[in-house]
Image (cartoon, rainbow, N blue to C red):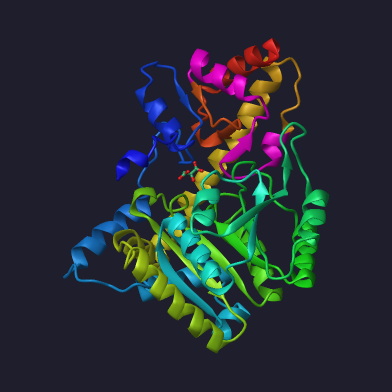
Amino acid sequence: MFERLDRLNEDPILGLMARYRADPAPDKVDLGVGVYRNLDGETPVLAAVRSAEASVIGAQTTKSYVAPAGRAEFNAAVADLVLGPAHAALRERRARTVQAPGGCGALRLGAELIRASAPTAVVHVSDPSWANHIPLLGGCGLQLARYPYYDAAAHALRFESMLECLERAPAGDVVLIHACCHNPTGADLSGPQWTALIDLLERRRLTPFLDLAYQGLGTGLDADAEGVRRVAERIPELLVAVSFSKNLGLYRERAGALIAVCADVDRADAVHSHLLQIARSIYSMPPDHGAAIAARVLADPLLRESWIAELGEMRGRLVGMRALLAGRLRAATGGGDFDFLTGQSGMFSLLGVSGAAVAALRDEHHIYMTADSRMNVAGILPGNAQHVADSVAAILRRGI
Ligand code: LMR
């Protein structure tokens, strides 16, 4: 049976992670996979997580099943965190949240729900977007299309082209939107741009599917959810995929959730029943440990305060490293314009160089970034910024 299967190419992000690990060079720099790194270059367990984890394990009396929807208190806390506790969708009981195996699990749950209710709907994905959006959403059979989002060479949003493209999408189609810290560009919509997009979604009767994987790593916990909240004020039906991989550092625990906001309570109950059945048919129930930790951090005022403070430090480090890298690149290139780095937010920015330049940075300078020249700025440290800047400048001088 398996003789029909040819060997596939490596995943573009996870394959790069493996290549970086295998590189023995002492001065190698990992700007690849999207994990946060502190000033020591480590991806630490957050203090609030460490403390919550100890109390979760201490209080655990059983390993029995939870439920396909996961933990009720986790789901309630996630809905509050994302939508804000006073949001009309929560007050009117029109939102249903289901715990999922990470943000990826939430995206796939959402895709399966779309396929169940609107199998011919096309999902419009930004160009560029996170590489794994395509298999996660398209893998269940949905048709995908791309809308222009960002010009990597000009380091600028293509907002007018985005609107023009979505204006032509038929009613009932779905638009995948990065809620904050766009991956891979770091270029987010401004307040007025969100307004224009929401106007279009409403007028064209398009369903938004928001991916919120970096809440708190852009501008702040509430500010990063502002786009989602504004969409949910105006559009009756939407989906939000939530991840705690980055903002709680729970990567390997796979803690995420899907929020479905519906037009009314009955529709919300129907959607919920489908989500439970989809979860049951794919993985039965989500893993509990990460969600138990997240629920504890969100519920305990002291742990929550500690988390918010640490998240603020993480965000500050990203902002600081953006400024450091932009300055070093400017100096190393003799005045090149790298201001885009400081104007963007979250972990990622596109350097805007060719695939050949990315390969030369990796093979000759041991600097790892994805083929589209996405850099994870959390990989920049005071000790490696000069090496990165000098290497990029050397590659740019070669004009490849
Ligand atoms: C990334 O974009 O690098 C992260 O979200 C990790 C992943 O799973 O791709």
> Where's residue 177, x and y in %?
64, 57
Q: Residue at x 67, y 65 (%)?
A: 173
Left or right relative to 357: residue 293 = left
- Tell whether position 358 is magenta: yes
The picture quadrant where one finds residue 227 is bottom right
Give the percent coordinates (x, y) of residue 277: 39, 74
User: Which residue: 37% across, 76% down?
Assistant: 72
Q: Is residue 263 magenta?
A: no
Residue 342 in the image: x percent, y percent? Answer: 68, 37
Above-or-below relation of 110 to 358 = below
Asked whether 239 or 339 is in front, the reply is 239
103 left or right, relative to 346: left
In the depicted structure, whether residue 104 falls above or below residue 199: above
Q: Is residue 198 visible?
A: yes
Spot occupied by residue 192 in the image (x, y as percentages of width and height): 80, 59
Tell me the quarter of the image containing the C terminus: top right
Query: Is 161 placed above or below 339 here?
Result: below
Q: Which stretch appears magenta? A: 340-366
